[in-house]
Amino acid sequence: MNEKVFNLLLHEETEYEVADSTIEFGNNSSNMVITIFSNPYCNPCAAMHKRLQDLYASNSCLIRYVFTSFKPEWNIINKFLIAVYQQYGAEKAWEGLYRMVRQRKVFSGALFR
């Protein structure tokens, strides 16, 4: 990215819209928002998710996940989690994400039953 464009965006943009790849967990009225750029295939991302478990349980903040992937064909995992979130709610989506990183398994329908 052009450095001039980067600096302009950094200083001029207050927010970047990522609604298609974002889900939120926790307290929507909290003043503390933690934004995580995460990838289901990323080991450091999995470690971060485990660290956020206590914060989520305390309901003291809003945790916003923005999902990414290293390859376009891996986006299916992100889309699956977002669909679970939209159809079954935050609790089921959090449970599935936590189970996935704990077990280091790619999502399957069995994770959400």
Image: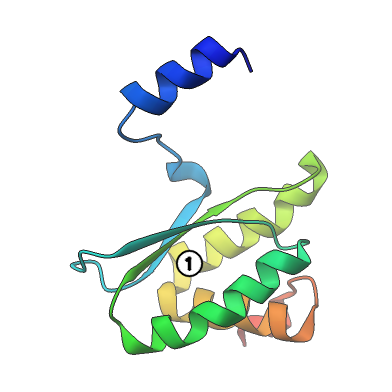
Q: Is residue 45 left or right of residue 90?
A: right
In which quadrant is the C terminus drawn?
Answer: bottom right
How many numbered marks are there? 1
Please name the residue that numbered disc 1 is placed on.
85
23 or 1: nearer the viewer: 1
| Residue occupying the point 20% across, 64% down | 31
Bin the neighbour count of mark 1 within 10 Å (Cα to Cα): few under 14, some 14-19, many 20 and up.
Answer: some
Q: Is residue 78 left or right of residue 28?
A: right
Rendering coords of residue 82 (x, y %): 54, 59
Rendering coords of residue 29 (x, y %): 18, 67
Asked which quadrant contains residue 50, the reply is bottom right
Secondary structure at numbered mark 1: helix
Please, is residue 104 above or below residue 11 in the view?
A: below
Inspect the image, locate mark 1, and give the three-letter code of the amino acid beneath it: Tyr
Please, is residue 78 above or below residue 51 in the view?
A: above
Rendering coords of residue 33 (x, y %): 32, 61
Rendering coords of residue 66 (x, y %): 52, 52
State the scheme by which the image is colored. rainbow
| Residue occupying the point 59% across, 64% down | 81
| Residue occupying the point 54% across, 68% down | 84
